[in-house]
Image (cartoon, rainbow, N blue to C red):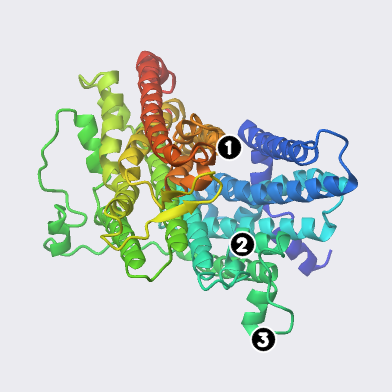
Amino acid sequence: MPVILRWFLRLVPLNPIAVRLVQNGSRRKSHNLIRSAYLAVLIVVLLWSLLLGAGGGGGAPSYRELAEAGASSFTRIAYLQIALICILAPVFMASAIAQESNPKTWDILLTTPLTAGQIVLGNLLGRLLFILALLLASLPLFATTQYFGGVPASSIFASYLVAGCAALLVGSIAIALSVSRIVGRRAVFTFYVVVVSYLAITAALDTLSHSTGKSGVTWWTGVNPFLALRALLNPASYPRAEAGTQTGLTALFLEHPVTAWCVASSGVSLVLLVVSTFTVRAGGLQRAATRTSGVPWYRRMMGLGASGSEYRPPRTVSSNPIAWREAAARNSTFWKILARWSFVVLGALGGVGLVAALHGGGISKAEFRQIMLAVVWTESAVITLIAINMAATAVSREREDGTLDLILTTPITPAMYLSGKLRGLIAYLLPLLAVPIGTLLAAGLYVLTDGLGKGGVTVPVRFTTVPTDVPMVLPFAGLTAALVLIPFIAFCVMIGLHWSLKSKGTIGSVVGTVGVVGVIAGIVGLCGWKSADIQGIGPMLAALNPASFFFASIFPEAAMSGTLDTGPGGVAWARVALAIGAACAGAIHMGVVVGIRAALVRSFDFTVRKLAGTR
């Protein structure tokens, strides 16, 4: 066999690390369950979409109706597939990041005759194969849409290319973080925050680029997989620039956004892999922190001692030491404190600045409402992910480092322990929750004061028999948002504590929590979204999920049309029904929290003894 061929085989297809990862991962039941759940979700959505699109007429559908149903169904599952890839890719790449938490693994690996390229590509391909297997497994499902017509084969393969490049980019970032050895296993959660924030910000910037009234592809389309897929599947509503009208990079991003996304994501992935190849045997980017005498002023301002010091300033402990410890441990370093309050300050300035821009005429009412909805959705999603990550690692982390064994030797009871965890996490998250709630409060106060006397804070409703105006944001949306959002976050925290107590490690508890919260919140949110326009009871159901509640508060004429269609009195009834629904949603979530806590207290000793000694 030629030397170059043997070198290529050991670098890619017969890479020892990739072979080991594939063999071990193929035996895991969790991977099989994820693949089965992935296909089940796509199948259910496809069948539901086909039945809804082709069976709504009551008779035998025509060929044209079948083609339209097939095209719309393909569009829905194509978007869903990219969303699932963005969610599941960090799950499969999590172990690559977690390797850094045990440096001995790297030390042993670096003593082998494997080259730097084999180490990097083996880790990437071995884990990326499971993600690509998900895409290939759904190919027959996508192919069935061609039986109905209206779905060209080129669009199917192009959508797979977009999803594959997204998976490659996520995998390359995970390998780069693992090789750099500057993050720990809890950085898996950062994936979700970064992915959600990046997609939301680029989508919002794309929306702002259309503020002049011009629609179509923008520079942001080529850097967002959902926007690139939109340009591919919806060329009429999201047109590209005419071929030949642009040159250079402008032509690539505005005329061929799908190609731009694939080239950009592949290029970034290649750069990350090359850098990782050079740093993997150099010990990564981790450097020992230099110790300096004295305490810097910025650390003293935050009540911290010198970096690396064995002494720290004394602190006052609250009545529940677990609650105090859980809240205080999140603010134990300078960067954690800076990140938390940066989110609060920037969010507050953004909300006030948005209202100021509307008052000054910088943006229109339509743009203000779209940006407001995107902002509160993104902020709530980020806070939810932070809550899930902290709760899902609260107990399993202590079990891994042996802290739980020490706590159990104290007079702290299981009820005090679980209640303290819940209270401490909610206390830490309250300043973050104040950001979306305060943003809605500022907008509601602006509407309540009639735009500070300027007016123009209502939107005409055109579908009622009597001319009716509705506020562009419900005046008391901030107050009712607190009734919905805070109990919902408490519910997410309690689910995370449940999985953290019953899981062996932090990664398993995070994945389980994300799955349970995602399924429950998704089902309830979709039900509330579809039933919000039902007269009377619709607004109450819309408040069961924060996402549908925010939409109903900012776009009441679209979310609660069935109630508003009754005339001027419908506006007042919609507000009252939404407030009642918010109170009921808060009570339901808190009831679930109390029930889960009681069940965990009863089974606490059994579960802890069962997993005793697990690391």
Q: Does 359 appear above or below 594?
A: below
Compute the Cα span from label 2 to label 3: 21 Å
The structure residue drawn at horizontal position 72% and vertical position 57%, both measured from the top left corner, is: 159
Q: Nearer the viewer, residue 273 or 519?
A: 519
* Three-letter amino acid code of the residue under disc 1: Lys
Question: For residue 57, which quarter of the picture?
Answer: top right
- Whether 65 is drawn above or below 9: the answer is above
Residue placed most toward the observer, 499 or 530:
530
Relative side of 210 to 75, left or right: left
Give the class, few, some or many, for how many residues have Cα within 10 Å of label 3's Cα (few <14, many ≥20): few
Residue 247 shows which numbered tag?
Answer: 3
- Which label sits in the foreground, 3 or 1? 1
The quarter holding residue 568 reads: top left
Of mark 2 and mark 1, the one earlier in the sequence is 2
Residue labelled with disc 2 = 227
Q: Amino acid at mark 3?
A: Thr
Mark 2 or 1: the one toward you: 1
Quadrant in which the N terminus is drawn: bottom right
Which residue in the structure is indicated by mark 1?
530
| Front residue of 76 and 506 | 76
